[in-house]
Image: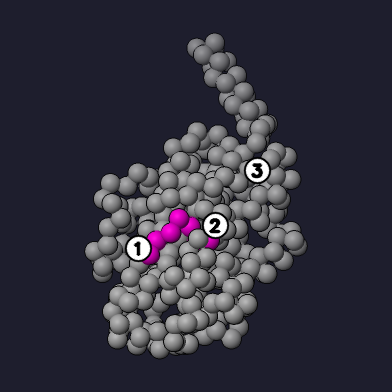
Amino acid sequence: MNFIRWCAALCAVAGAAAHAAYPEKPIRLIAPFAPGGNIDITARAVAPGLSEQLGQPVIVENRGGAGGRIGTELVAKAAPDGYTMLLGSSGMLTVNVAFVSKPTYDPMRDFIGASTIALAPIVLVTHPALPVKTAQQFIALARARPGAILMASAGTGSNTHLTGELFQALTGIKLTHVPYKGTAPALVDLVGGHTQCLFDQVSTSGPFILSGRLRAIGVAGLKRAALLPDVPTMAESGVRDFVAATSTGIYLPAATPREIVNRVSSALLRVLDLAQTREAFARLGVEVIKGAPEEMSKSLAAYLARWRKLQQLTGLKLD
């Protein structure tokens, strides 16, 4: 018995020492969308500071496809050793459960959050050639021409897609969905006039709006976006109950030892306190939000409830 206890104690000491030494090699930060979108921009904004805080390179790796589900599944099934992390959003993580018959991961079971990072307001943007300037004009045109307006998205099942579906369900209009492999290519085609609208994060559409290449119709937030103070909220425009934003954070596989999660969390919180991080996010119109793992779980549960309600309203499936 004494020998067994000694072995157990030795293993515990060895395990603690291994965790204390973390990290000992480069870390992959998976951005489950193509370069240039909100998730990718956020990942690249925090990766340098996280590298400095952890003492190892944090390499952003884009694994796009299936509305973010491919990269997310990769992290869900990765070794829980702290060397593969996900830059994800609450909305994206919960889509798999709400809209897929046989989900390949469960956000509540398969992930643990390190900290939330930021909240990016969603804005409805249109190509300037579309003859609308307000939400009510947009709705009226869509009702007069069902399916004629092409709605771009970052991919089927992405937050940009489902936000558009929610808008249609609430307003009773019909748009034609055109999915892309990420926000960046969707924006390129929208600016080029190949599609007419997009429900996008202010962080990625902002530069196009400010330069006049796209027109902002309304912000789907409780308040106006700091980057676009002259653009009304959807509630101000008469579209009630349409509130949407992208809440991003860093997640690890659920079985990751708590010591490692805490190490990543502490490092990330220090990065979010840096002046250069806050200035970078302010330029993007993104609000820095710090949240503990327990708060992240509550956020996931709230998004999951929202998407399940949308699925019931629309019958939409992503299989």
Task: Using residue 285 as the reference point, say whether residue 131 is left or right of it.
Answer: left
Which residue carries the number 1 mark? 307
| Any part of residue 77 in sight | yes
Q: Which residues are magenta?
A: 178-184
**Mark 3 or mark 2: whose residue is earlier in sequence:** 2
In the rendered structure, find residue 57 and report the number of the disc placed on it: none
Disc 1 is placed on an element classified as helix
Disc 2 is placed on an element classified as helix
Q: Residues within 10 Å of mark 2 (few under 14, many from 20)?
A: many
| 10 over 180 or under it: above or below | above
Q: Nearer the viewer, mark 3 or mark 1?
A: 3
| Any part of residue 247 in sight | no
Tell me the quarter of the picture where residue 165 sits. Answer: bottom left
Q: Residue 255's x, y, as percent?
A: 48, 37
Which residue carries the number 2 mark? 39
Q: Residue flagged by tag 3: what amino acid is it?
A: Val
* Count of all numbered marks drawn on residues in the image: 3
Q: Residue flagged by tag 1: what amino acid is it?
A: Trp
Q: CA distance from mark 3 to mark 2?
A: 15 Å
Residue placed at 62% from the left, 39% from the top?
27
Q: CA distance from mark 1 to mark 2?
A: 20 Å
Q: Residue flagged by tag 2: what amino acid is it?
A: Ile
Which residue carries the number 3 mark? 58
In this view, the residue in front, 312 or 154, is 154
Residue placed at 38% from the left, 65% from the top?
178
Disc 3 is placed on an element classified as strand
Residue placed at 68% from the left, 69% from the top?
283
